[in-house]
Image (cartoon, rainbow, N blue to C red):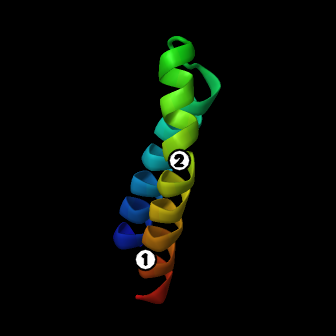
Amino acid sequence: MSKGFTTGLMIGAVMGATFGMLVDPINDKCHKRMNKTKENMFKAIGGMLDELMGR
């Protein structure tokens, strides 16, 4: 139960940070940079979720 709770907290923190960055860009330059790296962020998150679910 403790492992699941810890995993849930980590996933929630990563997803919250990602969503926050996508919803509230600081300026246009930052928004353009985030659009370029958005795919890589979601690929990394997907890889982490797959790794955690595979355990």
**In which quadrant will I find the C terminus?**
bottom left
User: At which x and y percent is residue 1?
Assistant: 42, 72
Q: How many marks?
A: 2
Rendered residue at 45%/62% (across/down): 44
> For this rendering, which residue is in front, 3 or 32?
32
Farthest residue, direction right: 23
Instruction: Give the answer, above or below, for where 1 lies relative to 42.
Output: below
Q: Which mark is residue 5?
A: none
> For this rendering, which residue is in front, 55 or 41?
41
Residue under numbered circle 1: 52
Rendered residue at 39%/54% (across/down): 10
Residue under numbered circle 2: 15
Find numbered disc 1 in the image and state the secondary structure of the residue it sits on.
helix
> For this rendering, which residue is in front, 35 or 55?
35
- Whether the residues at callouts 1 and 2 have beta carbons within 8 Å, the answer is no
Rendered residue at 50%/79% (across/down): 50
Task: Please state if 35 lies on the left or on the right of 55 as rendered.
Answer: right
Find numbered disc 2 in the image and state the secondary structure of the residue it sits on.
helix
Task: Please state if 9 lies on the left or on the right of 23 as rendered.
Answer: left
> For this rendering, which residue is in front, 4 or 46?
46
User: At which x and y percent is residue 39?
Assistant: 56, 54
Residue type (three-letter) at the residue carrying disc 2? Met
User: At which x and y percent is residue 48?
Assistant: 43, 69
Instruction: Give the answer, above or below, for where 49 lies relative to 54.
Output: above
Rendered residue at 57%/14% (across/down): 28
Instruction: Give the answer, above or below, for where 44 lies relative to 36.
Output: below
Residue type (three-letter) at the residue carrying disc 1? Leu
